[in-house]
Image (cartoon, grey):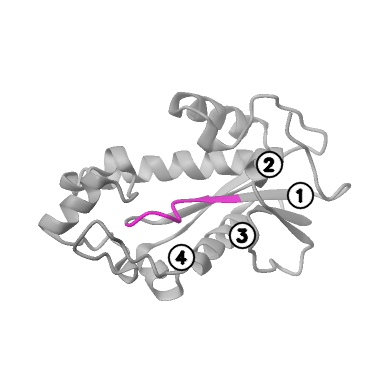
Amino acid sequence: MLGNNYHKGLVEAGCDEAGRGCLAGSVYAAAVIFPENYRNEQLDDSKKLSPTRRYALREQIEHDAIAWAIGIATPEEIDQLNILNASLLAMHRALDSLTIAPEAVIVDGNRFKPYKNLPFATIVKGDGKRLSIAAASILAKTYRDDYMLRIAEQYPVYDWASNKGYPTAKHREAIELYGLTPLHRQSFHIRKSTELDLFAHL
């Protein structure tokens, strides 16, 4: 089973994001606070779970967490700030939206900007090590997938219902044929070929 709190004795929020490597759509982040001694053998990195399992666990997370929230940064903000800073902004927005104020933060990966001077830790592959980060990864992924399904109805030729905005062959081919939409990340400078210049600090 994954580990519980990193900062013992503090109300700790775990954070993760979804959608950094996409060519289109917003980046989503989630923050989750569990009871200090919470246990759940089913939680894991969202990438290791089937869609059906992710959505089932989303319901359980929302029931069991003492607080959870979603934060979003738009394609326009990604273009203005770059994808790393937009991802961190989405995390801060998720933390801002929690109904219980955290006293510490743990984050998947190795980059974070201090939040309200709280103690924090970045944990590489943290979504496979800590329960609250794994839960955040599941919430961020499923809520972003829901969003991509909605916007896929506006632009069906890009196959976002299947690729969720990631640079699949079908997505790249549609860009070559139809160009970019307002929901594409313009700063990624998507070239006319299978080569993509993702210079926006992925």
Which secondary structure, mark 2? helix
Q: Is residue 168 visible?
A: yes
Mark 4 Cα-neighbour bin, 10 Å: few <14, some 14–19, many ≥20 = many
Which is nearer the N-term, disc 1 or disc 2? Answer: 1
Residue 93 forms part of the magenta stretch: no
Disc 1: which residue: 12
Relative to the observer, which residue lies in front, 19 or 150?
Answer: 19
Compared to 24, does 48 lie above or below? above
Separation of marks 1 and 4 at Cα, in angstroms: 25 Å
Q: Going by the picture, which residue comes out furthest to the left? A: 177
Amino acid on which disc 1 is placed: Glu
Span highlighted in magenta in the image? 16-23
**Residue 176's spot in the image, x, y percent?**
15, 58
The nearer-to-camera label among 4 and 2 is: 4
Return the residue found at the far right: 9
Q: Return the residue at label 4.
A: 83
- Residue 96: mark in rendering: 3
Compute the Cα span from label 3 to label 2: 17 Å
Which residue matches tag 2? 132
Magenta span: predominant SS is loop
